[in-house]
Image (spheres, rainbow, N blue to C red):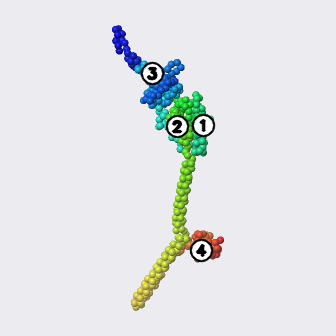
Amino acid sequence: MVDAPGKKVLSVSQLNRMTRQLLEQDLPVLWVEGEISNLARPASGHLYFSLKDDQAQIRCALFRSRGRNTEVAAANGQQVLVRGRVSIYEPRGDYQLIVDHLEPAGEGVLRRRLEELKRKLAAEGLFDEARKQDLPPLPRQIGLITSPSGAAIRDVLHILRRRFPAIPVVVYPVQVQGEQAKFDIVRALETAAARAECDVLILARGGGSLEDLWAFNEEIVARAMAACPIPLVAGIGHEVDFTIADLVADVRAPTPSGAAELVVPDGTDWLRRVEVLERRLALAARRVLHDARLALGAAAARLARCHPGFMLRQNAQRLDELRGQLTAALRNRLTLDRLRVHNALARLRSASPAVRVRGTQDRVASSRLRLASALRARLTVPGTRLAVLSGRLHTVSPLRTLERGYAIVLDATGTVVRSSAQVKPGDAITARVAEGVLKATVT
């Protein structure tokens, strides 16, 4: 700075520096829209261009460190929206805009609106995983909300038919682009919820620009999706497209076809699983039948042991044993009594006096009477018991069974026939009935 009497004189560099400082301090970060021209890309990686409209232009600089964050590749004639601070390039005194962000002008406003709505809905919890519903493993009916004339409906229906053709699909036709689209989508969601005829819904649309997909970024659509009680899958655009509907939906699919693959299982896999279950069921049934046959065999064996014939044989053997014991007891008793009589007679003969003989004879006669009475009494009890046992034996006798119309069948060897498997056609058999015997031949 050169001082002159009464004047304060600035150099050019001082003036440019002061002007730059004033502009940078007093003007905030600005958004400016215009058309790119005079674009230069030096080896340093910085971008220098002019931003113009139909009446004026301003020089701009986008340094390499900031250029990494830009969303588009700049080109001459491109309408863009830039954000930056006003400054001056001091060596030349050029008024310019130092840019830190650049995006297409048409989508820029929409993207700012999109980000603002994202923050708002995220703060309300509409994107939280905790509120999202699980998809049914095998839906009974699928609802499809899409345009009836677009490519998305053909892709979705093709995938659904290929993977699981047995599941019916209900189409809720809507516009997917334009001002009316958001209202159509909201009405379709409300209709599907009111009818409650589907287990899962697919909201689908093919790819497009941000403006084309804007109906799926509308707040009323997001709130209607959040309020829908039916699990909802969003298949909107291509894999790189991302809308608010994708964030609110219970499940986000990269494409409409991907949404169709998510809501239904692979029918081939299900058929394989059914075949495996069928084999396991057949194996279990065979195991149950085998166990039942074993139980039946054991029951038949127990029944054979309780058969009347078996019981008759057991009782007959016991009766023989009792009869033998009774005979032996009687024989022993008679022998003992004879011995006592013999001894008494011997003592009688040894007493020669006639009185003693007569007295002895009287006592002998009396003893004989008592002996006879005792013998009759002794024989009466075993006889009565024998009669009872004989009555019991007669009750369970095979002859009584035969009298009721049954028959005992014997083969040629005299063996009792208990099963048809013991004989074959042409064998001679004998059937013993209550009165007589029948000869027969097996046919």
Disc 2 marks a residue whose amino acid type is Glu
Cβ atoms under marks 2 and 3 closer than 8 Å:
no
Residue appearing at x 44%, y 22% in the figure: 85
Answer with mark 4 or mark 1, whichever residue precedes in sequence.
1
Cβ atoms under marks 4 and 1 closer than 8 Å:
no
Cβ atoms under marks 2 and 1 closer than 8 Å:
no
Quadrant where the image shows the C terminus: bottom right
Which residue is label 3 attached to?
A: 96
Task: Identify the element where label 3 is drawn.
Answer: strand
Q: Residues within 10 Å of mark 2 (few under 14, many from 20)?
A: few
Which residue is label 1 attached to?
A: 151
Please state the horizontal and vertical placement of residue 95, each as a whole percent of the image: 44, 19
Vertical arrangement, residue 251 with respect to residue 369, above or below: above
Task: Identify the element where label 2 is drawn.
Answer: loop
In the picture, the disc for residue 239 is: 2
Q: CA distance from mark 2 to mark 1?
A: 16 Å
Answer with mark 1 or mark 3, whichever residue precedes in sequence.
3
Answer with mark 2 or mark 4, whichever residue precedes in sequence.
2
Please state the horizontal and vertical placement of residue 358, each as a whole percent of the image: 43, 88
Task: Identify the element where label 4 is drawn.
Answer: strand
Disc 4 marks a residue whose amino acid type is Leu
420 and 397: which is toward the camera: 420
Q: Residues within 10 Å of mark 3 (few under 14, many from 20)?
A: many
Answer with mark 3 or mark 4, whichever residue precedes in sequence.
3
**Which mark lies nearer to you, 2 or 3?**
3
